[in-house]
Image (cartoon, helix red, strand yellow):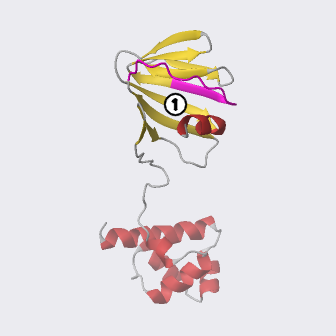
Amino acid sequence: MSTTDVETLARTRLRSLRSTLGYSLEELAERTHLSPSTISRIETGKRTLGLDVLVPLAQTLGVSLDALFERPGDEDVVIRPAPHSSGGHTTWPLSRSDGRTVAIKMRLEPSTRAPEQRVHPGHDWFVVIEGQVHLLLGDREIEVGTGEAAEFSTMTPHAIRAVGGPAELIMIFDREGQRAHVHQ
């Protein structure tokens, strides 16, 4: 980001904050002891940004100087999952840890050993994005293929296993489900 871009960002933020807080040029000028024309020229780029004007504006608008010049990032939107492997599966968190529901991507390796079925409070949902899995649901064994989804109460004993090769799933469950699935 060039110096001009950073200055434009700060000017836009100043104008936006003033507008959001409901200050006219005259009201902000009175509170900062600057003239309305000075503030207008700052917002439109016709006056240089100096500490002599930025400090009173930032204080009055309730922001730090850093906040005026901070480059917009994507950390509040984009999740960059890191894999965690355990046994025959790898998981990637796809949601933030503070939500009511949890989303993960899971890769299951095929195994000849039948997985242990578990019971816990909650509700699970998954979609198979690659491969094929068998959902063991009590006495039932249900085949779920690529592009298909399954949804069930977790109070029924359940487990999932890959069949015929690796399988990848996107799973969504509530906090109870997270404790049971992610921390096994």
State the residue in front, 48 or 100.
100
Residue identifier under label 1: 171
For badge 1, the amino acid type reads Met
Q: Is residue 21 left or right of residue 96?
A: right
Is 121 one of the magenta-colored residues?
Answer: yes
Residue at disc 1, secondary structure: strand
Residue 10, percent across and down?
44, 71
Where residue 88 sits, quadrant-wise, is: top left
Where residue 157 sits, quadrant-wise, is: top right
Q: Is residue 69 left or right of residue 138?
A: left
Where residue 150 sits, quadrant-wise, is: top right
Is 116 one of the magenta-colored residues?
Answer: yes
Residue in view at x 66 percent, y 37 percent: 176
Instruction: Provide the major secondary structure of the magenta segment.
Output: loop
Residue 81, percent across and down?
42, 45
Residue 72, percent across and down?
43, 61
- Vertical position of residue 105 compared to residue 37: above or below: above
Residue in view at x 55 percent, y 40 percent: 183
User: Quarter of the image containing the N terminus?
Assistant: bottom left
Residue in view at x 38 percent, y 21 percent: 110
Residue 182, percent across and down?
54, 38
- Vertical position of residue 154 compared to residue 53: above or below: above
Residue in view at x 48 percent, y 72 percent: 68
- Vertical position of residue 57 compared to residue 118: above or below: below
User: Quarter of the image containing the C terminus?
Assistant: top right
Q: Which residues are magenta?
A: 110-126
Mark 1 packing: few (<14 Cα in 10 Å), some, or many (20+)? many
Total numbered labels placed on residues in the image: 1
